[in-house]
Image (spheres, rainbow, N blue to C red):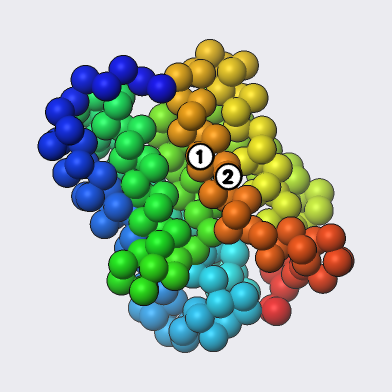
Amino acid sequence: MPVIETSLELLALTALLAYLLGSVPFGMIVAHVMGLGNLRAIGSGNIGATNVLRTGNKAAALLTLVFDAGKGAVAVLVARAALGEDAAQLAGLAAFLGHLFPVWLGFRGGKGVATFLGILLALNFWVGLAACATWLVVALVTRYSSLAALMSAALVPLWLIFLDYGFALALAVALTVLIYLRHAANIRRLRAGTEPRIGGKS
């Protein structure tokens, strides 16, 4: 945990603003602007890049990935520049919760993988890069986005320790637990062999 140096009032304001930024449903916005329909009625019904890819529009999926990762990174970087490391970590957590439980969508959001990776890249570029590389390797080998996300999240605490950034360990563990909770249905489908692969329509 970082040393708490920012006032509670500013930390509370940081958390609120980061949550609101994280809760912006870029997947649904991109799908609407590009005429792809309602993501809730497509594939898994999720609002993230993997489900956008199921529309067959790779550009839309890439935009969703960039925007969802970007909102997590922006929350961390702005909070760090304005207030410090304690605010940065809190902003990362709040932005992540915003994506998972967005006020604009009745608190029914996405699974947070892109936002998770964006937060890590902003907290420590090398840790984030290791997490992204883990996701990419597992995804290329298995073609399961969910398995790639689970493996990437599971290894993040190890990357933090290995790269000497252990004071973000509590945040990383919290985010990893949330990733696993949000992927509970995916874990069941992986075990049953019914999980759709990347690029699948259903």
> How far apart in space, not on screen, are marks 2 and 1 (Cα)?
5 Å
- Location of residue 199 with respect to 84 vertically, above or below: below
Give me the disc on residue 124: none
Q: Amino acid at mark 2?
A: Val
Crowding around mark 2 (Cα neighbors within 10 Å: few <14, some 14 to 19, many 20+) is: some
Residue marked by disc 1? 174
Which residue is located at x 66 percent, y 33 percent? Answer: 155
Total labels drawn: 2
Q: Quadrant of the C terminus?
A: bottom right
Q: For residue 195, what is the image quadrant?
A: bottom right
Element under disc 1: helix
Q: Amino acid at mark 1?
A: Ala
Element under disc 2: helix
Callouts 2 and 1 close, C-beta under 8 Å: yes
Residue positioned most to the front = 8
Residue marked by disc 2? 177
From the viewer's perspective, tell me whether residue 63 is left or right of residue 186. left
- Location of residue 199 with respect to 202 vertically, above or below: above
Which residue is located at x 75 percent, y 69 percent? Answer: 196
Which residue is located at x 41 percent, y 22 percent? Answer: 1
Q: Is residue 32 visible?
A: yes
